[in-house]
Amino acid sequence: MSTDKITFLTNWHATPYHAPLYLAQAKGYFKDEGIKVALLEPNDPSDVTEIIGTGKVDLGFKAMIHTLAAKARDFPVLSIGSLLDEPFTGVVYLKDSGITTDFRTLKGKRIGYVGEFGKIQIDELTSHYGMSPSDYTAVRCGMNVSKAIIEGSIDAGIGLENVQMVELEEWLTAQGRPKSDVQMLRIDELAELGCCCFCTILYIGNEKFISENPEKVRAFMRAVKRATDFVLAQPEQAWAEYVDFKPVMGTPLNRKIFERSFAYFSRDLKNVQRDWEKVTKYGKRLGVLADSFVPNYSNEFLGWSFEEESADPTGDQKRMVALQKDVAEAGGFQRLERRVCCA
């Protein structure tokens, strides 16, 4: 864009897990880096990669699978870092819906999805369980999956453990029902992916903007890294300052979403090569990426040392399930102690 400001488009309206971005603005970290940043919110999350890819906006947030698919559609977008690592994502449902841990119980049900790739994922899964896409009714809900489940217009929907699951848990509590009445069929387990990385939330950018403004991009990433460090070191203070900057955040529900997002924040912001390789293979399996597709990410704008790779990513997933269950029950801020590879 023809402006001295960097424009940044979020993947939806401001949410609790956007804290590092907004705190970088609120605390003057962008200013300290000598850059001006305009933070924008979309009317439709499905538009984000196209808006960035066509150069109408410089940078933004988007999930990994959408970032790959956008590049496959010839939108020149590049991931320059990670915000949330592997948030659990799946088909969220209530126990009284008639759905169980058996994927085949989705037959005859109305399943809500955010954007087209949610439907593609469910369609592809049906073939592994003796079903076809015509065996369920797909309902596009945008970001209103929880609302649609509560209203009864869908039986289940694709959502995040740290967002839609929390929204439904809070609704159940208000109804005098146990939080455990909301369940999730994790897509990574159903699809045997070995990670929930397809929904990792990324910092992405327009390739032309990035190539023409590498120092601005590095400055931007330094600022959000500094804000991420603040969030991880002082989550209570960070949340208070985020609410002060964005008063709409100041609800008990948003506080709980922030707590449940805390464990997923990427400490070093890097693009994880192993995850990109897995999701690229998954995208090819879904038919949204060509066999020759090369993943569109770079860590060259992250000027700090990275954490060592986990020695047991599968075990990490299991430990994360237990950790998030503890946070759901007791609240507070917890992160996984990862077991790293030997030097």
Image (cartoon, grey):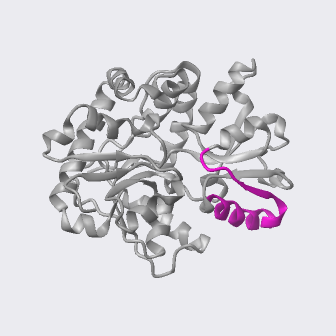
Q: Which residue is rendered at x = 24% and y = 49% of the image?
A: 221
Q: Name the spot of residue 144 as percent of width and height, x first.
A: 64, 43
Q: Name the spot of residue 37 as percent of width and height, x first.
A: 26, 47
Q: Which residue is rendered at x = 77% and y = 46% of the image?
A: 154
Instruction: State which quadrant residue 101 falls in.
Output: top right
**In front of the other: 279 or 217:** 217
The relative height of residue 62 versus residue 94 in the rendered view (above or below) is: below
Would residue 218 be counted in the magenta stretch? no
Magenta-highlighted residues: 118-143
Q: Which residue is rendered at x = 51% and y = 79% of the image?
A: 290
**Which residue in the rendered view is the most extreme toward the bottom?**
292
Q: Name the spot of residue 274 as percent of width and height, x first.
A: 41, 60
Instruction: State which quadrant residue 325 falls in.
Output: top right
Left or right of residue 73: residue 40? left
Q: Which residue is rendered at x = 40% and y = 39% of the image?
A: 18
Query: Number of numbered discs present?
Result: 0
**In front of the other: 137 or 107:** 137
**In front of the other: 160 or 46:** 46
Would residue 142 be counted in the magenta stretch? yes
Is residue 305 something one can see in this rendering?
no
Instruction: State which quadrant residue 282 falls in.
Output: bottom right
Q: Quadrant of the N terminus?
A: bottom left
Q: Name the spot of residue 79 as percent of width and height, x first.
A: 35, 60
Left or right of residue 305: residue 270? right
